[in-house]
Amino acid sequence: MRSLRREPALLLALLAVIALVLVFIVYPQVQVVVAPGSGGYASFLEGGTWVTPFVHSLEVMALSTTSAVLLGFVYAYAMVYSDMRWKPFFRLIGILPLLSPPFVVAASYILLFGPRGIITYGVFGQTPIIFGLLGIWGVQTIAFFPFAYQLIADALSRSDARMEQAARNLGAGPWRVFRTVTLPLSRPGLGAAILTTAIYIVEDFGNPQLIGGQFTVLPTQAYNLISGFGEFTSAAAVSTLLLLIALALYLAKIRLDGGRSFVTISGRASSMPRPPVPAVLSWACFSGSLVLAGVILMVYGTLLVSALTVLFPINLAPTARHFTFVVTGSNGDALRNTLVFSSVAALVSAIFALFAGWLVQRGDWPGRRVLDFLLILPAAIPGIFFGIGYLTAFNQPWLDWVDRGALIILSMVFWNIPVGYQAAVAGLRQIDRSIDEAATSLGASRLRGFWDVVRPLLGGSLRVGFVTTFVRAVTTLSVVIFLFTPATTVATIRIYQLVNDLNWGGATAFTVADISMAIAALVIFAALARGRLALGMARG
Amino acid sequence: MHLRVSHITKRFGSAAAVDDVSFDVPKGSFATLLGPSGCGKTTTLRMIAGFYEPDAGDIEIGGRRVNDLPAHRRGTAMVFQDYALFPHMTVYDNVAYGLRVAGRPRPERDKRVNDTLTFVGLGGMGGRWPNQLSGGQQQRVAVARALVIEPQVLLLDEPLSNLDAKLREQLRVELRILQRRLGMTFVYVTHDQDEALSLSDWIAVMNAGKVEQAGTPWEIYYHPRTAFLADFVGAVNLVPARVESVGDGSVTVSFGPHRASVRRPVDVSLSTGQEVRLCMRPESFTIAPAGASANGLALSGTIARRAFLGDTMRYWVKVDDREWIVDQPDPGATETLDGAVLLSLRPERVHVIAES
Ligand SMILES: Nc1ncnc2c1ncn2[C@@H]1O[C@H](COP(=O)(O)OP(=O)(O)OP(=O)(O)O)[C@@H](O)[C@H]1O
Ligand SMILES: [Mg+2]
């Protein structure tokens, strides 16, 4: 602490970070939580309207998490343990859903299985009722198993291959090694993966909103209360309930893995080689992965075909008219907004998170544990709650001079802080403290040392933070759904509106455009990472 | 005094890592903090550098109290054990960093960096990256980077400990020459007593957060104040004895059947009947076959074991009920001894430690 007082600039910077965190992370959330007041909570609880969506949310969470984790596990096991072929292909397919708004799975599902779906109606001539619990369950399973796969694969590949080799050398068979060595070793990681998947699912707004029908869950209930009835108080109470569930899951997860894992996009090389598995298991892995990859391809293939045809599935004549529609007029503005908002948000978020991570990781001031917690807290905050928080706190007459685009950017910046923050902390752990101290002892202030030495060395963390935040920003619906205005609409909002208008061609073309942005960001990222690799080799 | 450390204390939790440590280092001298692992050397050095905040006590550099100055304003520079070279900068940029921060103009910077690199034997290597250098070269870059800013005090934390023995010895000599030539004040931390003895003008031996004794290498080696110290700075025979009488400048002690009149240690009060320990270095003895004539104090015994150390032959000699360690220099010049031997020792080579 005294060391801070000796460097006023550093102290100021720290105070600024704390102020920003208080204003943009703590204050809006507190606003929502206290909005109903004790009387409001009492009548809300008595009113009982919360019971049904609450139970629904838990039901959906239990069912979808179980199935998503099972499928994700199959894919992850196949990727990490088997020596099946086509792994690069499967890896690419596995990343695709991370680059798209999860709710487009619901859109695709309607196109395939809806009343006029190509399979239900086109093939079987049926117009089944696909909405409700079964629909949500199916859609969320497909939408989130790729996330589960990423988290589980990460947990599995952290287990030490040498231990498995050792167990094999001692005569244990592959299944036995997996059961007695791998599983126990990766249990915390797996538990954390399950809990993280559960958070994604329980917070999901878009899928239940599109195909839930009468079946409301907490996020959709909160949205409907505000947009349909202007019932702000009840909505705040409902989303506080949702926050409690997410927070409980998140705290359990932190206990398991210390708050590490996050679906980040990193350039991590493939893991260590594992002991070989029997050929038959490899084939089973291959078949399973092929089916799952097929499902993913069907989901996105449907969207792509719909975007390129006149009226899917009735008129399959190719056309570019939907893309023309997407890039012109207010739609074009929405696309541009997406790109601008997300780029600015990702840049600001990654740099701010890096600096905050450095302050926390290298600091010796009291209260840094609290700041640490606040910086990872948004990971536990449902997007819908975050959006309501910003709506409550900042959509005020006295703030009318603020550009609404700025508000959207701010919400994206701070909702995604944990991404860049965790990347920064992980990066800082790789850099010995003596590197910072060397700069200081040569006459640089701590801030100068951060800029000259730490920042360039954390380029990798910065890129991971930037790209992941960018992708999350272009794909989020729930955070921005309360914040947009006609002039500051973004792609996900337009997709949502167009689906509601049953303009499928426009919606799917928008989706393709949106996903393309995410893919482009990832490709650039990969190119940059490779560039650094090449440079490193030239130097080494 | 150029660097003055007075009564500094640093606690981590409840345990004091450094406990009321004071010392002074004159300008231009090579001072060493020596002690076993965990005794608080690094902590002391880091308090001087400004990386740790002392819980109590003052630090002065060049007559100015620096407690309230941040690390980068103290005029200290540090050489780290793992060198902490900036991996994303070339050797030149690493060395130039401090001058760049200080806003030195480019021509001056170029000249000083190149001079310093030449000075440490790395002329022409400025374009390399740190990972293209050997451990010894990296170490030199780390030293050059700190030297070039001409700090008031250069702090070095075990800078040689990651190198192999041969290189360590070579760089040790170079460091000493460098320091002499520049007349810069060095504070050096090590747990290696050979390093400390050969490099330093002055040594403070630390133990459990305190300075046990400070003085010239000579004083530390031959006149340690405690048994811990005697043992820590080299092989030693520590023999329990009794004070028989205290004279002027000398003291008569007895151990077993032996009696000797030895030098009386300064600054220590001794009284008749007090239990003390005699400290005798193995190389202070002469060893000869039994029956040879003794020179000073004579002890007869038999050889229990011996070890050939190259430059000396070390014998463990059983005298009465104790084993004594005795070194014989240049073993190739005489034949190896066996059986009964006579040890002799001049009384002034016996040092009394007033601690039983
Ligand atoms: N940052 C810290 N937090 C808690 N305890 C510490 C910290 N730094 C040092 N200590 C403790 O303080 C004591 C002194 O540590 P210090 O690093 O000064 O020892 P040292 O003499 O440099 O040892 P070595 O020769 O092993 O480097 C040790 O017991 C150590 O465990
Ligand atoms: Mg140390």
Image: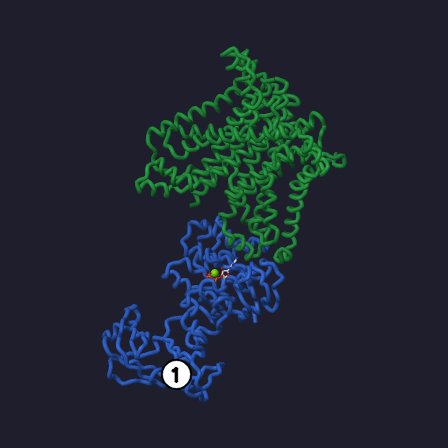
Dot 1 beta carbon under 8 Å from ligand 1? no
Left or right, residue A435 beside residue B232: right
- Residue at position x 47%, y 29% in the image: A94
Residue holding disc 1 = B348
Residue neighbourhood size for the residue with mark 1, other residues' Cα within 10 Å, grouped as few (<14), some (14–19), many (≥20): some
Q: Position of residue A105 (x, y in %)?
A: 54, 24
Quarter of the image containing the C terminus of chain B? bottom left
B250 relative to A173, above or below: below
- Please say whether residue B254 is visible from this viewpoint: yes
Left or right, residue A392 beside residue B265: right
Residue closest to the eye, B201 or B233: B233
B151 relative to A490, above or below: below
Q: Amino acid at mark 1?
A: Glu
User: The residue tagged with tag 1: helix, strand or loop?
Assistant: helix
Q: Subunit of mark 1?
A: B
Residue A48 lies in quadrant = top right
- Please say whether residue B115 is visible from this viewpoint: no
B268 relative to A349, above or below: below
Left or right, residue A179 beside residue A23: left
Colour convention of the picture? by chain
Chain (green): A
Residue closest to the eye, A29 or B315: A29
Quarter of the image containing the N terminus of chain B? bottom right
Q: Position of residue B84 (x, y in %)?
A: 48, 54
Chain B color in figure: blue
Q: Position of residue B217 (x, y in %)?
A: 44, 73
